[in-house]
Image (spheres, coloured by chain):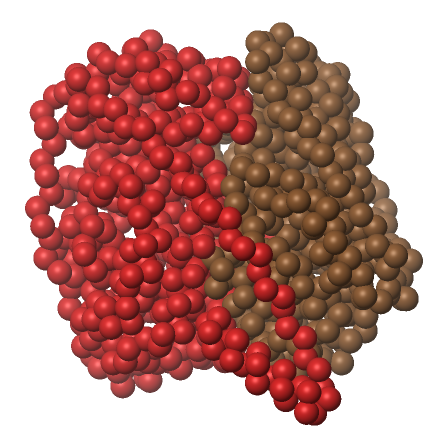
Chain colours: A red, B brown
Amino acid sequence: MRVQSKLRELGMGRGRLARCRGSVPLPHAGRRGEDARATAGETPAPRILALVVGIAALLGAISGMARDFPPAALPPKPLVLPSPELRVLPNGLKLVAVERHALPLVTLRLMAKSGAESDPATLPGTAQLVAALLTEGTPTRTAGQISEAIDSIGGLVDTGAGWDESYISLSVLNDHEELAFDLLSDMVMHSTFAPAEVDRKRRQTLSGLEVVRDDPDYVADTALRRLAFSGTPYGHPEDGTLAAVRRIAPEDLRAFYAAHYQPSNAVLAIVGDMHAAEAFERAEKWFGAWANQTPPSVPAASPEAGTHRILAIDKPDAVQTEIRVANFGAPRADQDYLALSIADQILGGPSENRLFKALRSHQGLTYGASSELLSYQTAGVWLCKTFTRTSETLKSLRLALEQMKQMHDHPITPQELETAQGYLIGHLALDFESSENVASHTLELLVYNLPLDSWNRFPEKIRALTTEEVWNAAGRRLAPENNIIVLVGNLSGFEKDLKKLGPVEFVPLADVDLGAQ
Amino acid sequence: MFRTFHKAHTGRAVFVAATLFLVTGTCGSVTLPHTSIHTVTLPNGLNACIVEDHQSPVVDVQVWYHVGSKNEVPGRTGFAHLFEHLMFDGTTNIGAEDFSDYIIRSGGIDNAYTTEDTTVFWETTPSSQLPVVLWLEADRMRNLDITQSVFNNEREVVEEERRLKFDNPPYGTVVETLYEHAYSVHPYQHMTIGSMHDLDNARIEDIKDFYDTYYVPNNATLVIVGDLDPNEAESMIQKYFGPLARGARLPANHIPQEPPQTAKRVVKLDLNVALPAFIEGYHMPADGTPDAYPLRLASNVLSEGESSRIYRRLVYDKQIALEAESTGNFTEDPNLFFVFAVLNQGRAPAEGEAEVEAELTRLKSQLVTDTELEKAKNETLRDFILSRQTVQTRGEELGYAAVVLKDANLVNTEPARFLAVTPADIQRVAQKYFVPENMTLVEVYPKNAGGGSKATGGR
């Protein structure tokens, strides 16, 4: 869960100094484009580059100043993506098996196709608390017995709830796979949500929420979400709010668990050193008796994201201002999604990143600038993020807005398209290296009802997109009058200038409302 | 900087797991293949370690320069890391920003990081890009070309990085305070990011000397892991790195060693945070030394997983802390083993400290059980295996073993050192290092809630 991982980060400024914002991509369910990258440059695409190389070589010959150029790459090797085998048990549980025999490791990942968007309206944080409590006791195992059993075989358990999905995953060495199925099925089918365990987790969650209220990055993201997704099931903090978490009772958790953790709403991925046939056999043995309750309600289509606003949150002791700008995006299964992925790469993704160039490479205003598509089942938002020292707040915000307007007003160049395509297609090989990644990318397709061969067909689809199509998709969404802006910083340093951009709501950090309830 | 924090990096072994299960009596069906390392040393002093791994059509290249923030002198803190940034800013052959463009265009990713001991540059790309990546790394090893404006720009970027990671977040300066007080002469006293004052004063004139001293083939180790033919990779290395001149001015090791601490040091901080916290740092020996292994396993016993002792006591049973963890920052020179906790509302640091003290006392007075030790070893093994999943983490292990531990083959042999640890070893190191006079304590109090004043106390 976000609050916990945030704490790890805060606790306390640890981790090496990697050069880029976000550093090394983590082996988890990141969507494409989340990998931060170090730099993005004036990317001459290969064709242009060849031209430049030619000219430069000539110049070199004339002037006698020889410049060297990198050699050609070797012929590319074919990437064979794992083809998952799919099976459905009579109770509706979907099974996905991916065989990977290089390491003696098996990862089981069970996903329920409901996450924080299914939180009861007055109880944000429910989905995350449910996920966090899956490891905390069943009728036959106490919380202590579960952790003891997992730790003693060197197992690694992880639970969480994001948007549109909740999951529990368990990785073990392959001679403990039977125990892994046993434990996982017990937690998924029989969690008890005992009041003492609920209180304990609640207390932890509340402490975490208190800590992140002082973290400008968290406050900016959360306030932005609230405005940009207002009127959709995606507008509250997935970690919950202090008031709501205090109220959530064991019955609320059990109700969520019963409604959403049922076989017809779940997928089990088995990835690793195990034959598919054996994986299906074990899954049937351990999950065959899992019964459906009532079918969960299908979320209704959401209205488009909110309208233009500027919110400035005052944190007088801040030395940096967190800057967020959001505009319309697209749901994950939207027909424009791939075209927008390309546009997003160019605006602020690893491959091109006009934002990074404008703010960091050319001006040294920030350590990081990026954009991201927040694309869910029924709603989507396009988000730009950066941060800068207080004195440069307005300049940085203006530069970011300018880049978004540029993307709205003008088509991308063929070179930019080529670079983004090259990155997205070439990066697949890196993205499918670890078992966890293979599992999460496969499950993503099932959450959003996308064809199982989507990743296999991804290269040809990306290659087929034109600059015109990308601009059509991007240009329809980035109208400046729809920008939602959130700033968190020391207001006295930029308040006056900010008013020039339009009406601004000013709020002290202590009063900011991160979720209505 | 803190190697053990990244789970993928904790485990550095690649090993015959069967041995473990033999030792622990569990089923012996788990085996990991031996890693064959193809090593090359060029006449100019460059070391290379090449490993073939055909799991995916990707390759990882890393250049490890044996220079980090411990090579910095007072008044110049942060320079090694600033220099790392400059390495992306153009050479006499390619323009600023071009380096990453070559990588990204192919679908690859690249980055770099600086620790106390090393500066590491890495790229993971489709395997067809290997010659391009090697050319690029060889190019920037000796042809860097930095203008004044690029330098100024990069310094501002690094200052933003400092604000982001240290000055702006809650608790951001706590570890910095700990090191400031735990060390008196050894350069581990300062953070790799450096002080804002020193960053402000960094000059472009300092670059050339630093570059010519440390960014030379005889101070570098090249690591290549992935879908490749080792002989072909070796000829590419010869071709691109062979012509580079050996550096002539690598200094002898003049790093002052820290004298033993003789009395407990306490610092109290008032910060704009919601919850009290504390961190204790105990001096411990360098990584790779015999005591490092029982200390690593002790750290697992204390805080790895929800059944571990510190988690169990502070977070689960007594519910004093929101989060509590112990971990060793193992490095080339002796560093700190630390225990930290963020406390729940209404709890005082002293309460948490007493509970930690009780756990450390237990570790000193009673042997850990065989079951607990086996659990710690299994967790270690798991991390070793997880770290073999990607070429980048494999490269990292190999580079670390070769440069910091000075023996690349430790990726094969180091697990045996963990397996040999006995309950008595853990008790011995606990008794030796977890003593008050060896400890520096930083207590954090939320502002306006009583407690200390800004950085009072001291050594």
> Camera-side residue: B177 or B252?
B252
Q: Residue furthest front?
A: A75
Horizontal arrangement in the rendering, residue A504 relative to residue B53 (left or right): left
Does B239 sit left or right of B24 as displayed? right
Residue B246 found in image quarter: bottom right
For residue B121, side relative to residue A406 (left or right): right
Residue A216 visible at all:
no
Residue A468 x/y as whole percent: 24, 73
Residue drawn at x 53%, y 23% is A104
Q: Compared with residue A84, is residue B44 higher up or lower down, i.e. above or below?
A: below
In this view, the residue farthest toward the bottom is: A63
Q: Position of residue B58 (x, y in %)?
A: 54, 47
| A334 in relation to B354, above or below | below
> Relative to A330, is B50 above or below?
above
Return the residue nearer the eye: B44 or A354: B44
Question: Can residue A434 be seen in the rendering of this structure?
Answer: yes
Q: Where is residue B287 in the image (x, y as percent from the top left)?
A: 75, 38
